[in-house]
Image (cartoon, grey):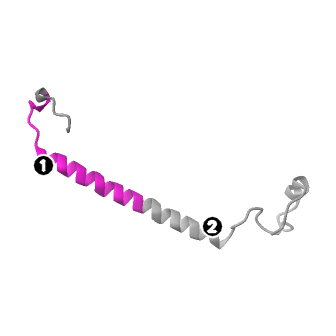
Amino acid sequence: MATVTNWIDHLNKPAEEVAGAIYPGAGSVEGILVIIALILWVGWHVLTARAESDELSRLARKRHSANDHKSNITDW
């Protein structure tokens, strides 16, 4: 891995002379990490939606009456 010793000269070079990215892990590793991040992101939303749906279904089965608030029921 190359070390940049003079940033001014490095940044003023044309793109053809620059050997590549100035940070490690550029290339296919980034693509793999993006795919993993997308899978985790979609999985998180699926799990969260399922958990919220189960919770709402559980609450809907309780069928609170109009006067339950008078009994100080805390688990609405």
Name the quadrant of the C terminus.
top left
Crowding at mark 2 (Cα within 10 Å: few <14, some 14-19, many 20+): few
Is residue 68 found inside the magenta-colored segment of the image?
yes
Q: Nearer the viewer, residue 61 or 17?
A: 61
Q: Which residue: 18% across, 50% down?
A: 58
Left or right: 6 as drawn, with respect to 22 = right
Magenta stretch bounds: 43-69
- Asked where in the image residue 24 lies, by quadrant, the reply is bottom right
Q: Which residue is mark 2?
A: 30
Q: Which residue: 16% across, 33% down?
A: 73
| Circle 1: residue type | Arg
Q: Position of residue 45 (x, y in %)?
A: 39, 57
Left or right: 50 as drawn, with respect to 74 = right
Secondary element under disc 2, as helix, strand or loop, is: helix
Q: Position of residue 16 (x, y in %)?
A: 84, 68
Q: Residue furthest top?
A: 70
Is residue 53 found inside the magenta-colored segment of the image?
yes
Which of the two discs, 2 and 1, labels the residue nearer the N terminus?
A: 2
Crowding at mark 1 (Cα within 10 Å: few <14, some 14-19, many 20+): few
Q: Is residue 18 above or below residue 59?
A: below
Left or right: 48 as drawn, with respect to 38 = left
Left or right: 28 as drawn, with respect to 12 = left
Q: Which residue: 18% across, 46% down?
A: 59
Q: Position of residue 68 (x, y in %)?
A: 11, 32
| Circle 2: residue type | Glu
Instruction: Give the alpha-carbon distance from disc 2 to disc 1, as whole Å.
Output: 47 Å
Q: Which residue: 85% across, 63% down?
A: 3
- Indicate which disc residue 61 carries: 1
